[in-house]
Image (tube, helix red, strand yellow):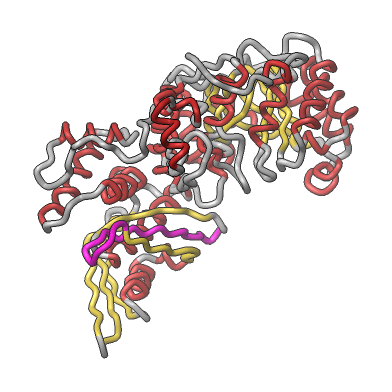
Amino acid sequence: MEFFVSPYIKFALKHASLPERVYVFDTTLRDGEQMPGVALTFEEKKMVAEQLAKLGVDVIEAGMPVVSEGENKAIKEIAGMRLGPEICALARTTREDIDAALDCDVDRVHVFIATSELHMKYKLKMTADEVLRRAIEAVEYTKSHGVKVEFSAEDATRSDLGFLKKVYSSVVEAGADVINIPDTVGATTPSAYAHIVEEIKKAVKPGVTISVHTHNDFGLATANALAAVERGAQQVHVTVNGIGERAGNASLEEVVMSLFALYGVTTNIKTTYIYETAKLIERLTGVRLQPNKPIIGTNTFKHESGIHAHAVLENPHTYEPLTPELIGRKRTSIVEEAIVIGKHTGGHSLRAKLENMGISVTEDQLKEIMVRVKEIGDKGKTVTDADLMAIVEDIVGRVAEKERVLRLEELTVVTGKGITPTATVRIRVGDKEKIASAIGVGPVDAACNALQSAVKEFQEMSLEEYNLEAITGGTDALGFVTVKLRDKDGAVYMARATDGDIVMASVQAIINAANKALLVRGYKPMGQ
């Protein structure tokens, strides 16, 4: 494929040590899910793993088994699916963590311990010698169980280089197959990171894979990862859409497409599935993509300037370094095909429309979307692309029926001038039905108070954020509600819901978030 990129790249890379192939280690299900407000259900995690396998990542870091029973179950299930990529589990350098990872029957265990003076003194409260001994023992123990071992020196970029070399060379001698160099708080620069990678590579024996893990606190995650590859790093840790703790991680799509188009370095990624994967993660996590997000943002292939638009019509390469088709996109972000969605729409037409929007859904989800579309059509309303996207995000992002702990059966709200807003809810909790009424300062507040009265678990949660958005203009617009719910342990869960009735959308969004929180805390779904 032809690319018109800077003629100076070849000159700049003249003294680089580029590997022939870079392995993509995806940590969306582990580091990505540590993003505040992101909590995937068991079924959603399996869906993400299947999509990552379809995309072609080499390694899926499925999570940290010791975190919870639910996390352990999900990792074990994903490992048992035999999707193709290596399945990896994260563990600290303790027997408890490592045994939990090994019990999941994963292909690789990723062991880590901090090596910076800051972390050793204030977090671990250990000496450098103790850290070194712990790292060696953990790698030896893990390797003795016949799995591939990856070792990370947490906060490597703020660690003493001499000590870092000693740790890495020691764990390689102990059997580590891959050594990962994390920029844990995203606080280094490309040239500094390249220097660290070069020095570590010289300090360890040949044959071990050098990996890098970068965070985006200063917006340098992708740049740092690429600088490391220039110095010979053969594996890069990434997340889809760059989600992750704080400012996030190196973005899979940015790193992969840069390697492909600018460096000419091979990966196993099937690039035409990038956009599809990005949209799936956006819908499941509730983290919206910014319009100007590189590679996958809605504005990436849009041109408003007359000069730009004219040139693109003549030759897209004038203002587009990549073609949208290369990542599985159409030239415009809104489908131009003449498929009108309404109450007469059939399943084939609806699926075609969704596929052209970069959306893949299951048969059950398609049926539910169809029902919602027809309900709107029966009211005489045209279903716009924005309406359709909101419905999809609601249904795909919702906890599956078989995983729900809570289900709203009925909601009645009375409000008006001179009337105190009053709500009554009938809700199913497991195999029991609860009914409660409450008043509030408004209909949504009254409904939330009724939920708290009906279900004691709601009393342990607080609504951290509430956002109502009208999808299209007019009094018949769909209400799109996003909420963040904080549980008693401080974890935050994001969820959304869409409905023509904004009170119903609000209550359903809160219930969706509560379902995620309760599942993570080990509550059994209905029927189990």
Residue at (17% x, 43% y) in the render: 341
Residue at horizontal 32 percent and vertical 41 percent from the top: 334
Residue 309 higher or lower than 149, as above or below = below
Q: How many marks?
A: 0
Compared with residue 80, is residue 246 higher up or lower down, i.e. above or below?
below
Residue at the spot 55% in from the left edge and 17% down from the top edge: 267
222 w.r.t. 521: above or below: above
For this rendering, which residue is in front, 204 or 82?
Answer: 204
The front one of 203 and 232 is: 232
Query: The C terminus is located in which quarter?
Result: top left
Is-magenta flag for residue 481?
Answer: yes
Q: Is residue 480 left or right of residue 72?
A: left
Instruction: State the image quarter where residue 449 is shown.
Output: bottom left
Q: Residue at x 39, y 25 (%)?
A: 325
> Is 198 in the magenta?
no
User: For the magenta stretch, what is the residue range?
Assistant: 471-489
Q: Percent position (x, y) of residue 271?
A: 46, 22
Q: Position of residue 358 (x, y in %)?
A: 34, 34
Please say if 363 is above or below 488: above
Q: Residue furthest bottom?
A: 418
Answer whether residue 527 is visible to the viewer in this image. Answer: no
Q: Position of residue 330 (x, y in %)?
A: 35, 31
Question: In the drawing, does residue 437 fall left or right of residue 489?
Answer: left
Residue 391 visible in the picture: yes
- The x and y percentages for residue 440 are 36, 79
